[in-house]
Amino acid sequence: MLRATTLGLLACASCTILPVQTSSTTPGTHSDSTSDRVRTYGRGESPEAGPKPVPIPILMPIVESPVDPWIGVNGNNPMTFDDHVEFGKRWEVRTQQVQCTAMRDHCLPPIAWMWIHMGDRSPVKDAHIVAFTPEGPSSPHYAKAHINSDPFTAYRTVPATRGNLVAGVLAAAHPKAIPDDPIEAFNLWSFGTVERVDWDLGFVWFVGSKEPRFITASRVAVLSYAPGGTVTILGGKQRTELAVAPADVILP
């Protein structure tokens, strides 16, 4: 099976790679010492020898332009990354001085999905950012939102454009016009059906809610997946019609 280690070489030629410290750190920080190691997602080195193995954190890259949503798919299922730490899921998100605009895919990893609880019957639902491991979806350490083992549907999303953000589509919106950093990008997103869009004001409204949401921090769902099923294209589009060109993203 194609692993995300290979995927990283294909998708991340323009990624921002962060240094990762193997020892414990304070959430939202990282060390610049020579003991730091560079990691993207994928299989890392084995834990250090000794009676208490230390997890080697995985930091997923920040892209410099929107990625094709099919990068997050392997066959009929979500792409997975290997945890390599048998006693716990250990991928992380940390503070980085970078604007998380739509051009950078809002600082979401190339294999990120939005996790929606199947029991949530509200018109506007909470969306959690996850990546898939061989054991199922996983939210990162230091993220503000976390998932559980309940049934879910996951969605691959792309930045909103004038072509894809239209009434009737499923979309997600971050509470800020631009997430301040990667940790903010992993906050809860709002997920619902688009009712209307006002391009002059820069806001989108979801069905069942009067709250305006920022177009600059909106993403449109293009693929869905539920356990036991297969990845499905949304909106009746063709496989080649889902990716967003850098020239089409909406910036502040």
Image (spheres, helix red, strand yellow):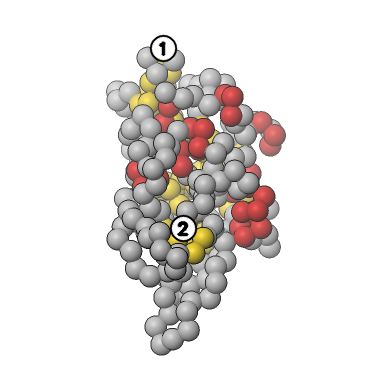
For the residue pair 25 and 173, the one nearer the viewer reads as: 25
Quadrant placement of the C terminus: top left
Q: How many marks?
A: 2
Q: Which residue is at a point 47% across and 53% down the rendered structure image?
A: 18
Q: Which residue is at a point 41% across and 87% down the rendered structure image?
A: 51
Q: Is residue 204 above or below residue 189?
A: above
Residue 196: which quarter of the image?
Answer: top left
Pinpoint residue 222: horizontal percent, then vertical percent. Answer: 56, 36
Q: Specify the farthest residue to the bottom.
A: 51
Badge 1 amino acid? Asp
Q: Is residue 224 visible?
A: no
Label disc, if present, on residue 43 of the rendered structure: none
Disc 2 target residue: 19
Q: Which residue is at a point 35% across and 43% down the rendered structure image?
A: 184
Q: Is residue 53 above or below residue 102?
A: below
Badge 2 amino acid? Pro
- State the SS at label 2: strand
Q: Which residue is at a point 43% across and 80% down the rendered structure image?
A: 53
Pinpoint residue 132: horizontal percent, then vertical percent. Answer: 52, 57
> Horizontal placement of 13 versus 106: left or right?
right
**Mark 2 and mark 1 in contact (Cβ < 8 Å)?**
no
For the residue pair 174 and 195, the one nearer the viewer reads as: 174
Pinpoint residue 42: horizontal percent, then vertical percent. Answer: 57, 61
Quadrant placement of the N terminus: bottom right
Pinpoint residue 147: horizontal percent, then vertical percent. Answer: 37, 55
Mark 1–mark 2 distance (CA, rounded to whole Å): 41 Å
- State the SS at label 1: loop
Q: Earlier in the sequence, mark 1 or mark 2?
A: 2
Label disc, if present, on residue 200 of the rendered structure: 1
Q: Specify the farthest residue to the front.
A: 34
What is the crowding at mark 1: few (fewer than 14 residues within 10 Å), some, or many (at least 20)? few
